[in-house]
Amino acid sequence: MLNPSAAQPIEPPEGSTVVGTGKGGVGKSTVAAHLAGESAAAGERTLLICVTGQDDDDLGIKRFNRGIHPEGPSVIDGEGLYSAIHDRTPLRPIREVRPNLDVMPGGPKVGEIDGLLMLRTLQEGAGVVMSLAQALAPIAALYDRIIFDSAPEKDSLEQLVLAAAKYLIVPTRSDDSSVRGMERISKNFKLVKTQVNPHLQMAGAFLYGSNRAATLMHAAVYEDIRTALGEGTPILETIVGYREVPARNARKKGLLFGEYADLLPTTATTYDVKAGRATSADVVPDTIVPLAKEMRELNQEIFDHTRRRA
Amino acid sequence: MGLFDVDEEAQQGQGAGGLFGGGLAAAAGAASVVVKPLPGTSLALIPAPYQPHSEDELSDQERADLEACKAGVDNLRNAFWIAGKSFETMSVAKLHREENPNYAAWVWDTWEVSESQLYRLIDEWRVGEALANLGHKPPESHVRAMTELRRQTNDKVAITVYDTIARCSPRVTGELVEKVVGDLGFLPKDAKPADVGRRVRELLEAPEKKSDADEKNDGVPDISSLGDDSPNGESSQKPSNSKADPLATKDIERLQNTLASLQEAAKKVNKSAARRAVEAQPDIAVPLIQEIGSLLQQIDRAVAIRLPKAE
């Protein structure tokens, strides 16, 4: 940490992957949380860094006070991320949010990083784009995989994340604006890759939250995506279907889809609810099973793609 | 050309926004981004002693002073790896060459650090620094307890072992580190940290799993408050059916065991005994009393959570 030779280039950690999007609301945070959870469940030491102003708390850190919080000031609501960048100190993640899974939570304070970096850019130059990479470097070696959840709110925040990672994956919805939105993130991708992080690679794009039975529509969407991305960018095959009820219930309980599906054998029935022995929140919908399965398949496909690119 | 295909020539200066908006040449200025010392690692950040400002809650300044002083005391734990890192840097860069070309002799003359201690500190600093960066405060003895493990494998495995112990146990002791290292037995040179971490978890969780299994045989069905509790074992804000949730059950057991231990301990000590012990053998009694106080504070902090209002 007491490193006066910070000018040395920082090679991003192996397996560090950004989940980024052209526009909001396409399932980026959900995918990032599940990727991190899947990796940790496989025994890999995993760090999830949420560079997002809006933290959905998919892992129940805030609502259920999960994990071992570091000593000192709170790191919730993006405070930890902000203070690491502001004070130029190593990241202090919340440990053991799940076995092997540590998290730097996002939140409103992340929004203030943009102003801080802009001010520093005036004084120090665009090298401040390496700030997150430098805060991560002292702890990166312990992790087998680092996942970044990167919001499309600000170019500066997206660049900060892309400068610290090796791979980018981009979820998109089937609508035109989502596909076209990829143009925005591609600009930051190319800028960061050519200026500060030549190791950065596009690992793939994929369709998220779409009706799996709509195969004809998917073919047309894939064609649009292929036209936009060109031949050089892989397009993943797995599509996670749109299932609002189980996804919402799982998030409300701060559980990943697989964890929520594990509760199915002990679910209450509507009969139990009518008899007053349980509440509707105790009923686990059957549709969580295919949702969990598809998400697991998507995670595996993403891991395979990043492995192949390594 | 696809959206993410990079054409370096065309890229120069095109559409630069965000942090690159001020001109692309500035990107070379990465040198100016330096990492600041942690609080307490610089003497200037630690305030000189002063009288209490009040008997009320700490002011913001007092809180900042407290953090700086705590970090200052943490230096006791950091000293060995900071020294080891400094020794290695001076040695590799031959920074001693003007004063004495013989490094070991120069170190002895300057700090009375023997050659064996010198190389031990150099050997240990990477693990010490990495663990400190992860928020742990291992004394040198803990890192030393992993020397053989590091020789067999590498630093990352040792860091993983220590970090896993810290995640799974409320308190890391030298004895526990030695036990885990001993139980791990011989590890091959190419042992994967993830596999070793898994093994450490198994070693530390084995006794608890047994009690979980016993609990599950109670035949009580569960239908309520599914998933309200953390998969990691912390309690949720609302009470759930603890009998049916093995993780919540484990938490209750932990609390019951802690209470039982404290009740037992309370029977064994009183003020007169403590006073007599300090008067008779202060060199032994004082550290013992301090350790007891520190553990009680640790427990106090652990249970200082917001409790639900009584209905």
Image (cartoon, grey):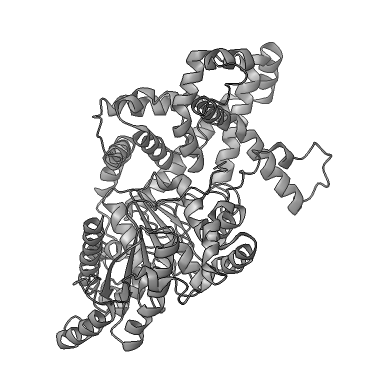
* The residue positioned farthest toward the front in the image shown: B9
Residue B133 against residue B153 in the figure, above or below: below
Quarter occupied by the C terminus of chain B? bottom right
Instruction: Place residue A291 in its image quadrant.
Output: bottom left
Quarter occupied by the N terminus of chain B? bottom left
Residue in the foreground of this view, choosing between B227 and B38 = B38
Instruction: Place residue A210 in its image quadrant.
Output: bottom left
Residue in the foreground of this view, choosing between B143 and A177 = A177
Instruction: Place residue B43 in its image quadrant.
Output: top right
Residue A188 against residue A67 in the figure, above or below: below
Residue B236 against residue B36 in the figure, above or below: below
Q: Is B81 situated left or right of B208 in this image?
A: right
Q: Position of residue A117 (x, y in %)?
A: 58, 64
Q: Position of residue B111 (x, y in %)?
A: 62, 17
Q: Is A121 situated left or right of A58 in this image?
A: right
Residue name at image x 24 percent, y 74 percent: A240
Can you see residue A258? yes
Can you see residue B308? no
Q: Position of residue A164 (x, y in %)?
A: 43, 57
Q: Position of residue A40 (x, y in %)?
A: 31, 52
Residue name at image x 75 percent, y 48 percent: B62
Residue in the foreground of this view, choosing between B300 and A255 = A255
* Total tally of numbered discs in the picture: 0
